[in-house]
Amino acid sequence: DTGVSQNPRHKITKRGQNVTFRCDPISEHNRLYWYRQTLGQGPEFLTYFQNEAQLEKSRLLSDRFSAERPKGSFSTLEIQRTEQGDSAMYLCASSLSLLLQETQYFGPGTRLLVL
Amino acid sequence: DAKTTQPPSMDCAEGRAANLPCNHSTISGNEYVYWYRQIHSQGPQYIIHGLKNNETNEMASLIITEDRKSSTLILPHATLRDTAVYYCIVRVHQGAQKLVFGQGTRLTINP
């Protein structure tokens, strides 16, 4: 299966610690998106990359959050000084921009619990 | 804010067709209707999308009204594995555009 993969699948951390998540998109997909989903809600957009360039960031992405996609392939999302409110599922999606279609495909997510 | 309205929950008997409605009365001419579903604790799964014609794939059928203000996702023979939250999303088809998810419809398939 060459779908979107995310690691780790689960992360438990203590408040104040830093965490980093990784997303590997579908091969050759040039766009990569990060979303966050809290319990009972639909996913909310955080940021997206086209190749290695980060082109849009949501206001939800505070300065404690940083995302990178250094070589236009995998991406990392780091949260510094985690807070209990950061507990959520972090979802990654990728897409291939073509003339006639662009469908986002999601990974399984990383579930973060901040104690 | 999401541009769609969906019932919060629905039930369907296993083996029957599940018909999930979605209202998108403010849809623009260049916006497509997308459907995703999310099975518990998994990432959203793409199902189908359409502009104005009815669409069918191996997972489902999408019926869009002539005025495009509403649509229905049809799962022809629902199974227990179809129990999930179903999201209806409108967006332009081209270009990088974030998906704006609403609350979706929680579909429960009963044995």
Image (cartoon, coloured by chain):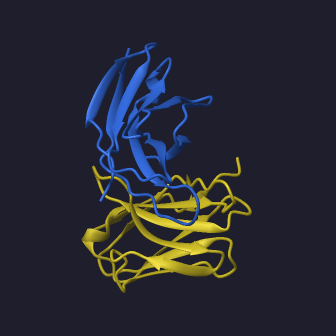
Asked whether A26 or B48 is in front, the reply is B48
Whole-percent x, y for residue B102 in the image: 32, 50
Tell me: residue A98, above or below residue B7: below
Whole-percent x, y for residue A67 in the image: 50, 79
Asked whether A4 or B33 is in front, the reply is B33
Q: Check the picture and name the quadrant holding the C terminus of chain A.
A: bottom left
Q: Residue at x 69, y 60 (%)?
A: A98
Is A94 placed left or right of B99 in the picture?
Answer: right
Q: Residue at x 56, y 69 (%)?
A: A22
Residue that protrudes farthest toward the bottom in the picture: A63
Is A7 placed left or right of A59 in the picture?
Answer: right
Q: Residue at x 46, y 13 (%)?
A: B15
Asked whether B25 or A53 is in front, the reply is B25
Whole-percent x, y for residue B9 in the image: 27, 32
Whole-percent x, y for residue B88 in the image: 40, 43
From the image, state the color of chain B: blue
Chain drawn yellow in the picture: A
